[in-house]
Image (cartoon, coloured by chain):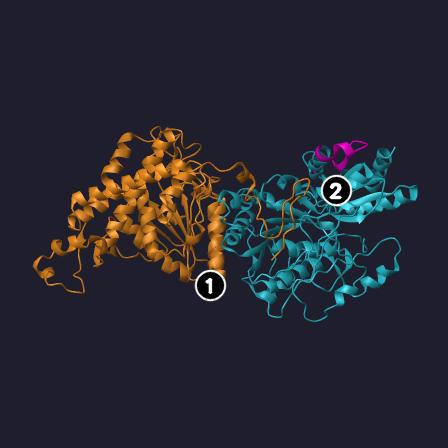
């Protein structure tokens, strides 16, 4: 799957002294110029090819060093392969584990709670090895009681701990909806700013391989209107690790949506420490004819469709929105202004899904730039059936994406 | 109730002359007299799966008078809130605590500000007990800027972080897992402090309570679950809602204690006992047998599901303030006039606070969007045009 990507996501090296403590380390995001030329830039682009700049301080990083993201261009640049050599290859769940482990080492306030995260190693192996390394007080096996252990995580976060609560499957977090909505999202507001809830709630969701209706839920649509929370969806090992680290460091409650089918994606990621911006979208493939907005697993369906489209002569611009709440309307807007056509491909249900909100947001803000109505391809409004063929038809397939683009670009 | 007084260790000669009162010297320094004395609680404690604490409570005149003053303050504050609600200065929900003051006051006497308290929506007096000012209470109730949550929380969302008061929660029962989370954080940071998670008899039937209790018992958390049993879950009597209304026993494997919640000294004794126990043995349940004079909230008259005789009966026999008053008078710790002066003082304080709160302005319109996210600490929330500057993550 996608081992190479283009991104303008910000990354920064961090100062990290050998004796890590709870003290916050300061680092700056590298300010970025949005992809297309824009007016009124208040940012300065710092960009470099390859990783050369990253090796400036092989040992002992200085504080506040701005390092640009190493961007590997897709279109046959030979710099790509050489620039990706210095990193290490791993699977997505290992990237999540690396991110989690690094944050737990860095800050003793970070703890993990969930079902089977400790001794069992996590049902998707994301927390494997952490219990032996950090002990039972920091990697906590909970009984099957989502409502209360999510509540406990939030209570602990109110005092300053940084729990990472795992839902074994995102669908189980429906049981904790009250805690997530009322306490997690709203306590910062209703207490007049007294309490912050730096919690991370994560778990795999999405349609898997014939897991059945109850285990194939997409909760991003249910959580999206809760005020006060942020939602991000990871799709590659690179952004999985980066988003995990950013989510843990953020003072706001963040829900990190992973996908059951993406855990075994392999990619080469940098050895250096980096994090991804929580509100930024990722430019996967720049183009001219149509903007395709997607996230999580659908990114791969879109990229597959993109190959077909390129052969047919179209030049789609693919953006992985990553941040589901709030939307990165800046990147999206600039893309819309360039291509004037938008196709949203998502795994959520048609009714009330992320795509629905995004359609509304784009129409409200960029109506003048659109040459055609926003098209939204989503899953069917049905419970996910068990039968393989039926399950395939609930979810958007690459062929449908190709047809949609052709329709849009008429 | 049996009274006994232990002669103070700093033996004053006139103690021998007047064994039951030391009227003369005491009058000069009521508020500072910390001569220990012992009072018996009204009824003995009943326990489940643990030992019973002693019925004799150590106290002193200063503490008793502080109890009196604090409870009188809380009572007056709640009654004033009643009038403000009827005058439409307070809107929405207003749940009043009068009748239950002994729980808030007794608990404070047994613990420090480092211990955490979390409660449900009947939180005005608990907030005051934790050190909140009357101005903050009334301003928040009226939705003004000077309120403890800047006017954005309301009656059910009082919080005071610096004295570890975690609110103030509207959804029944949801605060109990939060409270166990606080206890977890205390254990994690090895602070040797405890958390009191208060809930009502209505919330005692919530599943998440038992879930949280199970986890607390498994992980040995210093969590003390306090059921403020005022016998009515809104309009439903406890025997109609709970198959087993002995809430102190419902922890099953978790020990429990039943306490007379109208006796501030019994509450103090129980909380002290619970704190010592929780630090060593994990969670414990306290059931405070208490009563609320008002209805569930201001929209509930409180008399459709219980008789007025019952209410006035409790007020006559078990009122917490009267109990302390009788105690103080019978021990000659103060005169009736002095107590009445305290009440007048308290009334004036409340009236002043209300006047001050009325002058506080309503929140600015821009406050609508503040505190949704934490700004400047990482994630920024952008509008469509993203005019905000990026923040630096710590």
Q: What hue does chain A carry in this figure?
A: cyan
Q: Is residue A57 above or below residue B315?
A: below
- Name the side, left or right, on which A111 lies relative to A382: left
Disc 1 from disc 2: Cα separation: 47 Å
- Name the side, left or right, on which B104 lies relative to A88: left
- Residue A382 lies, in percent from the top left, at 71, 35
Q: Is residue A49 above or below residue B262?
A: below
Q: Is residue A338 magenta?
A: no
Q: Residue at x 7, y 59 (%)?
A: B17
Q: Nearer the viewer, residue A276 or B365?
A: B365
Chain at tag 2: A
> The magenta stretch spans which residues?
A364-383
Query: Counting other residues with Cα less than 10 Å from the Cα at mark 2, is it few (<14), some (14-19), or many (20 or more)?
Result: many
Q: Nearer the viewer, residue B201 or B195?
A: B195
- Residue B259 lies, in percent from the top left, at 31, 49
Q: What numbered label is drawn on residue B190?
A: 1
**What residue is disc 2 on?**
A332
Chain given the colour orange: B
Query: Counting other residues with Cα less than 10 Å from the Cα at mark 1, is it few (<14), some (14-19), or many (20 or more)?
Result: few
Chain at tag 1: B
Q: Quadrant of residue A91?
A: bottom right
Q: Nearer the viewer, residue B15 or A276?
A: A276
Secondary structure type for disc 2? helix
Q: Nearer the viewer, residue B343 or B387?
A: B387
Secondary structure type for disc 1? loop
- Residue A44 lies, in percent from the top left, at 73, 53
């Amino acid at each position: 799957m996608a081992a190479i990507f283009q991104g303008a996501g910000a990354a920064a090296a961090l100062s990290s002294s050998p004796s890590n403590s709870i003290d916050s380390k300061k680092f700056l995001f590298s300010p970025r110029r949005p992809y297309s030329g824009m007016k009124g830039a208040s940012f300065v682009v710092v960009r470099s090819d390859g990783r050369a700049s990253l090796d400036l301080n092989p040992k002992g990083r200085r504080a506040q060093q701005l390092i640009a993201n190493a961007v590997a261009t897709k279109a046959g640049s030979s710099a790509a392969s050489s620039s990706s050599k210095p990193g290490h290859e791993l699977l997505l769940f290992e990237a999540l584990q690396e991110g989690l482990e690094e944050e737990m080492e860095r800050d003793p306030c970070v703890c993990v709670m969930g079902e089977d995260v400790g001794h069992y190693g996590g049902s998707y192996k994301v927390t494997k090895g952490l219990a032996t390394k950090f002990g039972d007080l920091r990697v906590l096996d909970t009984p099957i009681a989502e409502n209360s252990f999510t509540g406990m995580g939030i209570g602990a976060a109110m005092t300053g701990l940084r729990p990472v609560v795992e839902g074994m499957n995102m669908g189980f977090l429906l049981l904790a909806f009250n805690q997530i909505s009322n306490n997690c999202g709203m306590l910062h507001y209703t207490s007049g700013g007294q309490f912050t809830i730096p919690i991370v709630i994560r778990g795999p969701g999405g349609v898997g391989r014939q897991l059945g209706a109850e285990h194939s839920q997409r909760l991003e649509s249910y959580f999206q209107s809760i005020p006060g929370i942020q939602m991000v969806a990871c799709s590659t090992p690179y952004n999985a690790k980066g988003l995990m680290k950013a989510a843990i460091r953020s003072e706001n409650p963040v829900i990190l949506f992973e996908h059951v089918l993406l855990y075994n994606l392999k990619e080469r990621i940098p050895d250096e420490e980096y994090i991804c911006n929580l509100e930024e979208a990722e430019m996967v493939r720049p183009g001219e004819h149509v903007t395709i907005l997607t996230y999580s697993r659908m990114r791969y369906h879109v990229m597959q469709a993109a190959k077909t489209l390129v052969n047919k002569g179209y030049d789609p611009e693919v953006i992985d929105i990553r941040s589901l709440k709030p939307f990165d309307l800046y990147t999206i807007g600039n893309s819309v202004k360039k291509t004037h056509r938008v196709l949203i491909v998502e795994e959520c249900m048609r009714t009330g899904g992320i795509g629905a909100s995004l359609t509304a947001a784009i129409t409200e803000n960029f109506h003048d730039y659109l040459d055609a109505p926003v098209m939204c391809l989503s899953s069917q409004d049905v419970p996910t059936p068990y039968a393989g063929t039926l399950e395939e038809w609930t979810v958007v397939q690459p062929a449908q994406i190709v047809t949609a683009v052709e329709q849009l670009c008429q | 109730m049996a009274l006994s007084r232990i002669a103070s260790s700093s033996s004053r000669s006139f103690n021998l002359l007047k064994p039951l009162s030391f009227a003369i010297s005491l009058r000069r320094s009521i508020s500072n007299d910390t001569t220990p004395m012992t009072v018996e609680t009204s009824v003995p404690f009943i326990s489940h799966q643990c030992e019973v604490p002693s019925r004799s409570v150590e106290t002193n005149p200063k503490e008793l008078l502080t109890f009196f003053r604090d409870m009188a303050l809380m009572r007056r504050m709640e009654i004033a809130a009643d009038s403000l609600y009827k005058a439409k200065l307070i809107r929405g929900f207003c749940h009043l605590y009068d009748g239950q003051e002994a729980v808030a006051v007794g608990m404070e006497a047994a613990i420090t500000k480092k211990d955490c308290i979390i409660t449900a929506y009947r939180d005005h007096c608990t907030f005051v007990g934790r050190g909140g000012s009357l101005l903050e209470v009334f301003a928040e109730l009226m939705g003004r800027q000077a309120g403890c949550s800047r006017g954005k929380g309301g009656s059910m969302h009082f919080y005071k972080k610096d004295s570890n008061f975690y609110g103030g929660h509207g959804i029944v029962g949801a605060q109990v897992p939060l409270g166990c989370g606080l206890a977890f954080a205390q254990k994690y940071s090895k602070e040797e402090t405890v958390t009191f998670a208060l809930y009502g008899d209505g919330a005692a039937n919530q599943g998440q309570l038992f879930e949280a209790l199970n986890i607390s018992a498994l992980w040995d958390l210093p969590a003390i679950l306090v059921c403020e049993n005022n016998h009515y879950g809104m309009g439903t009597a406890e025997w109609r809602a709970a198959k087993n209304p002995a809430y102190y026993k419902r922890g099953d494997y978790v020990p429990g204690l039943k306490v007379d919640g109208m006796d501030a000294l019994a509450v103090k004794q129980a909380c002290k006992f619970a704190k010592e126990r929780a630090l060593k043995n994990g969670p414990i349940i306290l059931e405070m047998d208490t009563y609320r004079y008002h209805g569930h909230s201001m929209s509930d008259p409180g008399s459709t599901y219980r008789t007025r005789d019952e209410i006035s009966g409790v007020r006559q026999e078990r009122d917490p303030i009267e109990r302390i008053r009788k105690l103080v008078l019978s021990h000659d710790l103060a005169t009736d006039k002095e107590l009445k002066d305290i009440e007048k003082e308290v009334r004036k304080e409340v009236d002043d606070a209300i006047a001050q709160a009325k002058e506080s302005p309503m929140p600015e319109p821009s406050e609508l969007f503040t505190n949704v996210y934490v700004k400047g600490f990482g994630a920024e929330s952008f509008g469509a045009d993203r005019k905000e500057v990026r923040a630096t993550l710590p």
